[in-house]
């Protein structure tokens, strides 16, 4: 669980890297929990979806090539670093996502195509 907290804090702090001093950017988005649906089972992981100004800053800061995202096929451009990805579309603007496995702390894509 400690690794997950470190990952979340790292993602949050990326938004201020391009500036002379750290800039606080409130994050907007949702967290989805995934795993077995029975009430007595543990959750397997979670997916984090970031929107708004934080997603815009993360997208612009990513040192990856923006490529056409065929999942949406609407002109969406996506940058990806490992399992962390940020996208820009005219309709939805900026969004970023990543999935985290809670038992092994591995990173996954936040959502499937």
Image: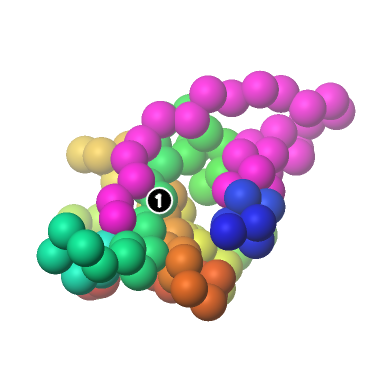
User: In this figure, which residue is indicated by the disc labeled 1?
Assistant: 48
Of all residues, the one furthest to the left in this rendering is 38
In-image side of 106 versus 97 (left or right):
right
Q: Is residue 47 above or below residue 16?
A: below
Kindly give the residue lying farthest to the right in the view shown. Answer: 20
* Snapshot quadrant of residue 63: bottom right
Q: Nearer the viewer, residue 19 or 4?
A: 4
Residue at screen point 41% across, 42% down: 50
Magenta extent: 7-33
18 over 109 or under it: above or below: above
User: Front-most of 27 and 2?
Assistant: 2
Q: Residue at x 21, y 39 (%)?
A: 91
Q: Position of residue 18 (x, y in %)?
A: 75, 38
Disc 1 crowd, CA 10 A, few/some/many (<14, 14-19, 20+): some
Residue at x 32% of width, y 63% of height: 43
- Residue 21: say if magenta: yes
Helix, strand or loop at disc 1? Answer: strand
- Residue 78 visible: no
Quadrant including the N terminus: bottom right
Image quadrant occupied by the C terminus: bottom left
Residue 106 at x, y percent in the picture: 53, 75
Where does the image place residue 20, in percent across and percent down from the top left?
85, 28
- The picture quadrant where one finds residue 21 is top right
Q: Quadrant of residue 25?
A: top right
Question: Would residue 100 appear left or right of 39 to someone viewing this image?
Answer: right
């Amino acid at each position: 669980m400690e690794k997950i907290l470190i990952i979340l804090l790292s993602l949050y702090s990326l938004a201020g890297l391009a500036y002379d001093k750290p800039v606080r950017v409130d994050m907007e988005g949702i967290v989805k929990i995934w795993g077995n649906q029975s009430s007595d089972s543990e959750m397997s992981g979670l997916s984090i979806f970031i929107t708004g100004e934080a997603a815009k800053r993360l997208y612009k800061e990513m040192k990856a090539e923006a490529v056409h995202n065929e999942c949406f096929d609407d002109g969406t451009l996506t940058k990806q670093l490992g399992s962390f990805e940020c996208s820009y579309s005219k309709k939805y603007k900026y969004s970023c996502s990543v999935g985290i496995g809670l038992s092994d702390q591995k990173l996954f894509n936040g959502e499937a195509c």
